[in-house]
Amino acid sequence: MRESLARTSGRLLAAAAGALALAAGLLTAAPQHAASAAEPAPSAADLTEITGFGSNPGNLSMYAYVPDGLPADAPVVVALHGCTQNARDYYDHSGWPELADRHGFAVVLPQTSSANNLNSCFNWFKPGDTARDSGEALSIKQMVDKAVTEFGADADRIHVTGLSAGGGMTANLLAAYPDVFAGGAVNAGLPAYCANNVATAYTCMYSPADKSPTEWGDSVRAAAPEGTTEWPRVAIWQGTADTTVRPANADELRDQWTDVWGLGQTPSRTADLPGGTTRSSYDDSAGRSAVEVYSISGMAHGLAVDPGDGTEQCGTAGTYYLDTICSSHHTAAFWGLIPTGAGRDQSSPSRSPSVSR
């Protein structure tokens, strides 16, 4: 970076953009596991690029995985990769295609590129890319619309998840489009609208603001359509040894989304899960889990996976895909995409009315 300061103005801007990507990209911690030699089982269906999904103001690419024989009115999971990754990488490691085959839903994998961000990060920190009907956020909404019409999917069962920068974008999408997404999962990510430039991106990553639940909740309510009374169910995944996105972010995310739901910050119950994972559940007025926090003891920065053939296993270990627990399985169960009793101690419907302020 220092050498670039002496170069031409164009090179200076490129170097500054590189620093921005590192600040906002989040994927800078050393991986905890080496890549596994195992690959997903071959299938007649495969990851496919889909074009012509809209005006695409965010300059993104749309990829999708549609299992053979997908029934009409199936759910859709939108899965956002982290920095230095792409749709194929997330497809190969996250476990979502395996779960789609087992439980009958489609997966949409948006992809950004170095043309948008030098480290191929979703621009979770740029207001022009995170507001409703703007930039990358609108491109992803257009992909959802395309999936509903192209696959005959159920528009009331659309869910979104993401890792790191993809997790930060996920939180923003849940805030901007609560009428589109029935549920979300933020993996090693940031509270919605935590940052609006590079300086605040650094702050969010390493020392997030200790705002009150109401202040965090107001950020969501301000981004959502006026009069919103229904909110997505939100899962929050965080490793306790993450030095890239500090665990305090999970606390702020919990405060944000429990406030949006009109709940307190004391869990309704907790449970011990595999991989040193503790799940804290925050129930709505009907006794159903609205917000869940999954804390993984000793896990560094990445997406939790658990390779294997067990009913609660999925994914492939690799760089930033850490062999602990299959987060995608437990997230899908929380959303209600997996039949009751298949790795879940209670039923959690996709969406339920909550409160607005």
Image: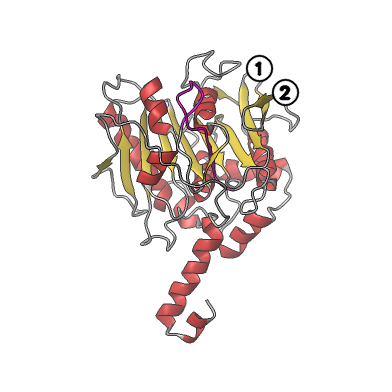
Question: Where does the image place residue 45, in percent across and percent down from the top left?
Answer: 26, 31
Q: Amino acid at mark 2?
A: Ser
Cβ atoms under marks 2 and 1 closer than 8 Å: yes
Q: Nearer the viewer, mark 2 or mark 1?
A: 2
Viewer-nearest residue: 209 or 23: 23
User: Which residue is denoted by mark 1 in the rendering?
Assistant: 287
Give the answer, above or below, for where 209 lies relative to 73: below
What residue appears at the point 68 percent right and 38 percent down from the top-left corner?
297
Alpha-carbon span between mark 2 and mark 1: 9 Å
Task: Please identify the quadrant where the C terminus is shown.
Answer: top right
The answer to which of 216 and 205 lies nearer the viewer is 205
- As drawn, the residue found furthest toward the top would be 341
Does the image show residue 319?
Answer: yes
Q: Which residue is mark 2?
A: 268
Looking at the image, tell me whether mark 2 or mark 1 is earlier in sequence order.
2
Relative to 83, residue 330 above or below = above
**Of residues 343 and 178, which is closer to you in this image?**
343
How has the structure been colored for display? secondary structure
Report the label total: 2
Task: Read off the magenta span.
Answer: 301-314
Give the quarter of the image for residue 146.
Answer: top left
Q: Is residue 141 visible?
A: no
Magenta stretch holds residue 247: no
